[in-house]
Amino acid sequence: MTRSWWGWGNVEDAVSPDERKALVRQVQTLLPNADLTLHQAPPLLSLRVRPPRVSAPSALAHLASTELADRVRHSHGQAYRDVVRCLMGRVDHVVDAVLRPTAENEVADVLDWCTGERIAVIPFGGGSSVVGGVEPRFDGDSGDVYAGVVALDLTAMNRVLEIDRVSRAARIQAGVLGPALEDQLRGDGYSLRHFPQSFEFSTLGGWLATRSGGHFATLYTHIDDLTESLRVVTPRGISESRRLPGSGAGPSPDRMFLGSEGTLGVITEAWMRLQERPRWRAGASVIFDDYAQAVDATRTVAQSGLFPSNCRLLDPTEAMLNAGTTTAGGVLVLAFESADHPVDGWLARAVEIVADYGGTLPDGVRSSDSADVNPTSGAADTWRSSFIRMPYRRDALAQHSMITETFETSCTWDTFDTLHAAVTEVATAAMATVDAPGVLTCRFTHVYPDGPSPYFGVYAAGHWGKTLGQWDDIKAAVSQVLVDHGASITHHHAIGRDHRGWYDRQRPEPFADVLRAAKDVLDPAGILNPGVLIDPADGRPPA
């Protein structure tokens, strides 16, 4: 397989001609006046990229690459704005080299070299950041703050080192990609059971550094829930927490590094809690005629203690676009699974709950007791297939000047109605202001007893050459609404550089001071991922 230099995933898996035609037809039906001219990405070799400014010392030279494809692909993430800029040949900030350590001592050696030479280091896993988390955007034209910048690619450190079958945990190197991790655990009958949408192209270390949220909607949703201990290399030394199921011994050292996005250290290993691979599954698609009742039904299921593996509510527009279902109130995708026992009773009780709110099951209930079968039906099956293909379709639509992007948040149940109305109003107004007619969708990706994680999608007709600015204006307007209404600027996409301004408003100022102090102690030269979470060492805010 060949990784795309400008977009998501593998070149061979990009949308087919027939899939592209179907997407264009769907847009023409929804937005008949959209200009859907196709724009191809420029050849990689046509990009104007500054020559490398630094060279690895002889002891590290075997780890380093300065190949153009390596440098470009390690200089951007996978957000819509990354894709658009690449399509336009705008690769404005490029790392000078990519280093691929194979062992922890080599990570330490790289940090020693970069600290001594004032070279910025961006820890890099799969490069699937959608918030500017791996882009060297701090690297301005002046070139006088850092001598250079390198990407520290951890993917060569990709093994499951040890499995504790008694405690059901594994010691795992941080650079392992999702599929390779599951392959290594499968032979022992285990799974990490963490499947973000980026699963195929993201790493354990990336999940830990960004506090990733997985596919499952309740209970063990974030990577935090699965972490037993961490081992982190910092310029100051190695931090390794003790393996414990829980501890009240002061603030958690793991919590300091979870979500730190490579600013405090490089996660090299982690002991992770495992799950046995599920055998019993049951699922259903619930149709509603009223969206408010659908929300109430979802809340009641979330507060029932049933803890479904999937409890994903699609609003009517999301259901139509990505599940092929026309409904006035939306679709609730419900699913349960277990390695220990049949789950039909849990689903039956959930069905009783949603029926009280007018939910119906036109496709009935499906279940299985085979580890190789995942029962889905109707809208749920269609939406699952669409979910997997979404990033590829997003890239294809971007080539046709469509603005296809998302923003996600979390809020308490009592504030959701007000937040949803405000986001809808502001997003609709912003699309009109930037002359990008479109629609807004909403789905719940995760639900908790005290609130949901609403995930909003924008599908708008942009103008080629202006789509980046149009999206930035829409994003800024909605982000302001999220912060003003007490919601989170992100639930599982991290902060990076794109969310910095709003994150600064969300976090308590005393905590910001503590974070800066931790940075000064662990990374006194300020070389680790400058501008993420806090300002770079020179004090400039991120661009």
Image (cartoon, helix red, strand yellow):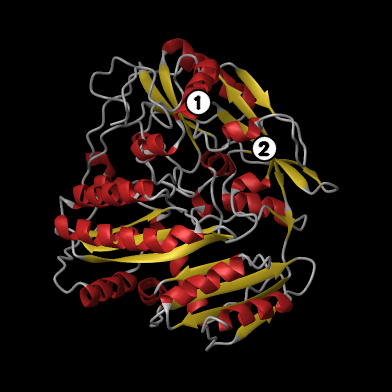
Q: Mark 2 points at which residue?
A: 270
Whether residue 429 is situated above or below residue 57 in the rendered picture: below
Whether residue 355 is situated above or below residue 296 in the rendered picture: below
Question: Could you tell me residue 386's position as x and y percent?
Answer: 43, 69
Residue 527, picture quadrant: top left
- In the picture, the quarter occupied by the C terminus is top left
- Residue sitting at 76 percent across and 46 percent down? 169
Q: Nearer the viewer, mark 1 or mark 2?
A: 1
Whether residue 485 is situated above or below residue 336 in the rendered picture: above
* Residue at the outermost front position: 414
Who is closer to the viewer here, 137 or 286? 286
What is the crowding at mark 1: few (fewer than 14 residues within 10 Å), some, or many (at least 20)? some
Question: Could you tell me residue 209's position as x and y percent?
Answer: 54, 38
Residue 400 shows in this picture: no
Residue type highlighted by circle 2: Ala
Whether residue 372 is situated above or below residue 63 in the rendered picture: below
Horizontal placement of 12 versus 176: left or right? left
> How far apart are the alpha carbons under marks 1 and 2?
22 Å
Count of picture labels: 2
- Residue sitting at 16 percent across and 50 percent down? 466
Q: Earlier in the sequence, mark 1 or mark 2?
A: 2
Horizontal placement of 473 versus 269: left or right? left
Which label sits on residue 111? Answer: none
- Residue sitting at 30 percent across and 71 percent down? 23
Q: Name the residue under label 1.
A: 515
Q: Is mark 1 on a helix, strand or loop?
A: helix
